[in-house]
Amino acid sequence: MAETTSAGRLIVDQQTRPYLPSYLKLRHDPGRGRWVLLAPERILTPDETAVAVLKLCDGKRTVEEIAKALAAEYAAPVEVIAADIQELLQGLADKGYVRA
Amino acid sequence: MSETELKGNGHCPAVVVDDEPTSGVSGSTSASEVLCALSPVGLLAELTHRCPLQCPYCSNPLELERVNKELTTGEWVSVMEQAGAMGILQVHLSGGEPTARKDLEEIVSAAAKAGLYTNLITAAVTLNRPRLEELVKRGLDHVQISFQDVDAENAERIGAYPGATQKKRDVAHWVTELGLPLTINAPIHRQNIHSVGRYIELALELGAQRLEVAHVQYYGWAYLNRAALIPTYEQTVESIEFVERERARLKGVLTIDMVVPDYYAKRPKPCMGGWGKGFMNITPAGKVLPCHAAETIGHLKFDNVKDRPLLDIWLNSEAFNAFRGTSWMKEPCRSCAFREIDWGGCRCQAMAITGDARNTDPACALSPYHGEMVALAHSEAAQPPKPFIYRNPHNAPSAAKSEQRPLVLAE
């Protein structure tokens, strides 16, 4: 799909303070041993990294702060994590699942 | 639904749990996974066949269920509890018109308590604000409202309900005011296909998160009314290309899901994501079906939630096992490289068009019936539309008896 910058599209950068709209449900699916993000007529299956990110999306922390927190926790280079998170959140924002 | 959109980000894959019989859902059948992984993720609960609208493409069966056959409150509550326990994640509360059930509140409570993501699929013409607020309080997660057209006069002719459009608009506003996500459902056919662009404007105006451009699928009432509904090939292609462009333009603003008509396709849709693979449907009377049209396959026997636990029906019932996997397939499906991609397409369409549910879906170019089905579509779309046979209890008995012969191959 072509890249667009339509009016109203959230562009995620390092200073964005992302949060999940209340109509999404991040929930553990015990029978299948995984996490699910329940959305209107969609089920997303975030991996461990995505779950860790989503749990920190509280509308207060910036993407940069989330990256620092996770870099410390996972002992990984912050710039790699920051870019990865930005891409993840942009993908979710484009589906309407992340706001700021 | 494009593959890229489905895959999403590498960290967060997504599957569609649509109420439409197209892209379907994918459950796992890997034996190494726990039992729950074998259970469906989506449940379509057809709470009633009562409906104030009379849309001639209704997905309900021709033989509409009577009120006195409907499951009780307690039985629906039990269904929701069992669904949650067996690992189902989303429930579509549908009908008919689900708000015709006076106990919808209790059913929503039970579904929410069972951990299900609850979608209300409504015509919205009989729903008032206090009731919607109560449903939200009880845990309703999402509302989908159908608009029969954007043009009110045409919409109210198609749905046979004067004043419907304003009521739907009112409910749409309440949904967003109450902070719930809104989906606009646009059932597309030859008599409103010119409005696809206006549907997108409507969805944006109403603050919807999602628009379903759902080309009518020809089962049940829509099969009966096909000559009044099927668009031309050119109209179909034009509308699909238009939506693709709009989808790119509105990325991040409006999600547009498209259900495409398959009479003009080359490959069949992976109907329901595979029979008995990720989805189940419960009728107002409690029959458990692999899809909402499954009763058109006359020889199948369906179990009822009143007689057997839901999980037992899912795992062991004759109807669910009839077309699971690939062992039931005949040629050309059996040896086809796509057999685990499209699962042979739609069993109900194979039944309706070819008279044998085990045949390849005639939407597939490899089906010997494909050419005739396409020719039929072209010829019906070229004629002036026939008058609608409206979906109502009055027309149901004669519609159910009307002979719908499968196509006969030329000698």
Image (cartoon, grey):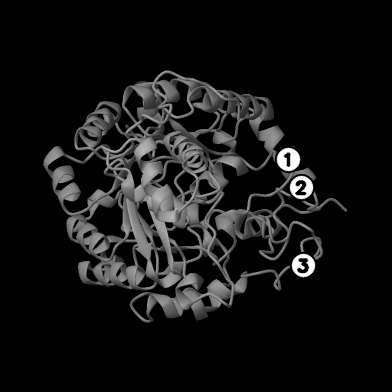
Front one among B207 and B214: B207
Q: Are marks 1 and 2 in contact (CB under 8 Å)?
A: yes
Image vertical order of residue A6 relative to residue A14, above or below? above
Q: Categorize mark 2 by other alpha carbons within 10 Å: few (<14), some (14-19), many (20+).
A: many
Tell me which label, 1 or 3, sits earlier in the chain. Answer: 3
Distance (Cα) linking label 1 and label 3: 22 Å
Q: Is residue A80 left or right of residue B53?
A: right
Residue A95: percent from the left, percent from the top?
A: 44, 37
Q: Looking at the rendering, which quadrant does residue B209 occupy?
A: top left
Give the total of numbered labels: 3
The extreme left residue here reads: B130
Q: Amino acid at mark 2?
A: His
Front one among A29 and B132: A29
Q: Amino acid at mark 3?
A: Lys
Q: Residue at x 46, y 36 (%)?
A: A86
Tell me which label, 2 or 3, sits earlier in the chain. Answer: 3
Pointers 1 and 3 within a single chain: yes
Residue B130: percent from the left, percent from the top?
A: 11, 42
Q: Is residue B364 visible?
A: yes
Distance (Cα) linking label 2 and label 3: 16 Å
**Protein chain holding label 3:** B
**Protein chain holding label 1:** B
Instruction: Say which quadrant the N terminus of chain B sits in.
Output: top right
Which residue position is annotated with label 1? B374
Residue B14: percent from the left, percent from the top?
A: 50, 50
Which residue position is annotated with label 2? B370
Front one among B12 and B31: B12
The extreme right residue here reads: B411
Q: Is residue B182 left or right of residue A41?
A: left
Q: Categorize mark 1 by other alpha carbons within 10 Å: few (<14), some (14-19), many (20+).
A: some
Mark 1: secondary structure: helix
Which-is-in-front pick, marks 2 and 3?
3
